[in-house]
Each structure stands twice: as structure tokens, then as C-alpha cells.
């Protein structure tokens, strides 16, 4: 399971150990973003694994340098680095299931972030209790047991069991959108609307996730090949399936920062009189249409 040292992951680790999980591997990646504090986090998790007598996998990555090299945001680079680390540990330890401590408030915040970015239902349902994610040719089963548990309940659990955890000072920084949502925007909306909007948003996200799972099952035979897209087959699909097929293809090809505009630009290549046969991507990559195929070079 992923353990940052924060209260959420500490609560999840304690509960899993308490439930009798004996073969846990505590995974901690040092992002090297906060100097000595990051090193202290890693040392704290190391001591915790020894206390619970569970296996430990430690890693370290200079996320800031990685973000600059790949032209990603710090948050995106950190997430990609974590999943790459999880995939490496999964391969070495011959396991494929990872527990993460995302909770109900995380789900609400992620839903709103994706909504503001103009994401479709795929983006709005991006966080599920159980999901499969392919990382570096490794299929990981992601399990989020706390996705229906609110932050205040986790706080109560931590206090009840007197659990020690590491407080990340960056969580109070209002520069990241997620922190502004958490500390300013959601409280402001609840105060002015006069109701707990988090529960309503959570239900909407849960419904979107269930519908997405159903659509995924229904669209498995959309006819798109693994590497190149067939222009003829894509043209034959309804617009919604065209978008979904292109989105899945871009994700499989590890394209970063996928948004509605990019999907629509690629979809414009399907037009019979399309004048443009090349779409620019990040990192000097391009989508091209040639000989009835759409491919990345």
C-alpha cells in the first residue's frame, strides 16, 4: 500500500493491520520536494513499517527535475513518479494490488477539478473504489477502501487510536487549486448555498463512475487497434464513442495533459476534406493521418 506518512495513509495502514492483513508491503516514495522534511517522512514510514512488522519498499525521485524535464506540473510529475514506483515494486514483489488512502473529500475535490477543466464523464469518474491502471506494462489493481469515508471521520479515527503522523505544510499552501478548493471554495459555497454540497457532489461522482464502468464494458469492441487508429472504423462510430476511443488511445500511448480540445483536434482528422493532417503534442510528438490511419510519431 502507498504510505506518505500523512494522517490518511496512516489511518488506512492501521486499519488494514488491525483487520489482519499480514502480507502488506508499505511503499513510500521520497519526492525530494521539501528537503529534510521529505527525508524525515521517509524515516518515519520506515520506523512505522518496523513497528507493524510489515515489508517496506522505499524509493526516491527528484520530482522537480522530472517535472522540468517532461514539461509537467509538479503534481502531475509526482503522481506519475508514484505510479511508476508502484509498478516497479509490484513487479519485483510479484503483487498487483495496491491500497491507496484517497477518501470522500478527495473524490469531491478531484471531481470539481476535472469539472473546471472541462472533462467529460471519463474525467469526472476518474477516482473509483476499485480500478485497473496499466503502468509501464504492469496492470495494477487500485483499491481505495476510504473513498466513502469523510475527512472528519478519519480525524476521529486517528485521535481515537492516538496515531502519530507527519503533517505536510504544503497542504496549507493556497497556490494549488486543490488546496484552494479545500480551504476556501467549498466552505464558501456551503456557507452561501446553506447546505452540505459535498455529499451531493460525492453522489454525482459515484453515479458517473458506475455509468463509466458500464460504458467501458459496452465499448470494448469499438474496433480500434492497439497502436494506430483506423479512420474508416472511427468514422463509423457515434461521436461519443469516437471521443472515448481517441481518449483511451492517447492514454495508452502515454500522452500527457489530455483535454477536450486535443481529442476534438484529433477527431477533426476524420473529416474527408480535412486540410490538416498533423496535430502537435507535447515533448515533440505528433499525431498524423496517413493512408487511412491515425498514428503518433
Image: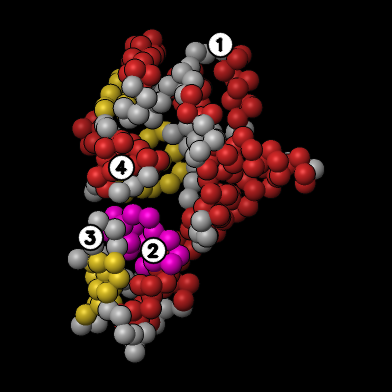
Query: Which badge, 3 or 2, is on the more N-terminal residue?
Result: 2
The part of the image, by quadrant, that contains residue 196 is top right
Q: Is residue 247 magenta?
A: yes
Magenta span: 246-262
The reply to whether the C-beta atoms of the residues labelled 3 and 2 are less than 8 Å apart is: no
Please tell me which residue is depicted at 63% across the width and 52% down the height of the picture.
Answer: 204
In this picture, is 219 found above or below 48?
below
The CA span between labels 3 and 1 is 51 Å
Q: Quadrant of the N terminus?
A: top left
Answer whether residue 192 is magenta in the image: no
**What mark, if any, has residue 67 been given in the picture?**
4
Mark pair 2, 4: CA separation = 23 Å
Q: Which residue is mark 1?
A: 162
For residue 186, above or below residue 51: below
Check disc 4: other Cα within 10 Å, few if <14, some if 14-19, many if 20+: some
Residue with the most extreme front position: 175
Query: Mark 2 highlights which residue?
Result: 247
Quadrant where the image shows the C terminus: bottom left
Amino acid at each position: 500500500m502507498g504510505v506518505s506518512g500523512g494522517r490518511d495513509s496512516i489511518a488506512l495502514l492501521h486499519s488494514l493491520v488491525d483487520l489482519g492483513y499480514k502480507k502488506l508491503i508499505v511503499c513510500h516514495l521520497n519526492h525530494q520536494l521539501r528537503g529534510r522534511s521529505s527525508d524525515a517522512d521517509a524515516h518515519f514510514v520506515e520506523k512505522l513499517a518496523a513497528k507493524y512488522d510489515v515489508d517496506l519498499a522505499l524509493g526516491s525521485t527528484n520530482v522537480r527535475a522530472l517535472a522540468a524535464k517532461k514539461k509537467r506540473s509538479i503534481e502531475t510529475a509526482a503522481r506519475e513518479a508514484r505510479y511508476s514506483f508502484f509498478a516497479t515494486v509490484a513487479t519485483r514483489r510479484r503483487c498487483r494490488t495496491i491500497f491507496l488512502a484517497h477518501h470522500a473529500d478527495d473524490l469531491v475535490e478531484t471531481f470539481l477539478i476535472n469539472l473546471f477543466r472541462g472533462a467529460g464523464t471519463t474525467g469526472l469518474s476518474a477516482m473509483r473504489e476499485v480500478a485497473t491502471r496499466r503502468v509501464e506494462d504492469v496492470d495494477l489493481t487500485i483499491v481505495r477502501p476510504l473513498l466513502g469515508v469523510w475527512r472528519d471521520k478519519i480525524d476521529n479515527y486517528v485521535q481515537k487510536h492516538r496515531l502519530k503522523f507527519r503533517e505536510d505544510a504544503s497542504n496549507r499552501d493556497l497556490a494549488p487549486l486543490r488546496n484552494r478548493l479545500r480551504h476556501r471554495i467549498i466552505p464558501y459555497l456551503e456557507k452561501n448555498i446553506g447546505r452540505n454540497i459535498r455529499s451531493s457532489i460525492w453522489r454525482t461522482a459515484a453515479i458517473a463512475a458506475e455509468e463509466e464502468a458500464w460504458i467501458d464494458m459496452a465499448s470494448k469492441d469499438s474496433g480500434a487497434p492497439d497502436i494506430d487508429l483506423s479512420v474508416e472504423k472511427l468514422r463509423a462510430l457515434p461521436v461519443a464513442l469516437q471521443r472515448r476511443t481517441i481518449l483511451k488511445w492517447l492514454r495508452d500511448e502515454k500522452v500527457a495533459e489530455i483535454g477536450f480540445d486535443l481529442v476534438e483536434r484529433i477527431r477533426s482528422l476524420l473529416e474527408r476534406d480535412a486540410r490538416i493532417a498533423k496535430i502537435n503534442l507535447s515533448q515533440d510528438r505528433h499525431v498524423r493521418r496517413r493512408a487511412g490511419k491515425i498514428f503518433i510519431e
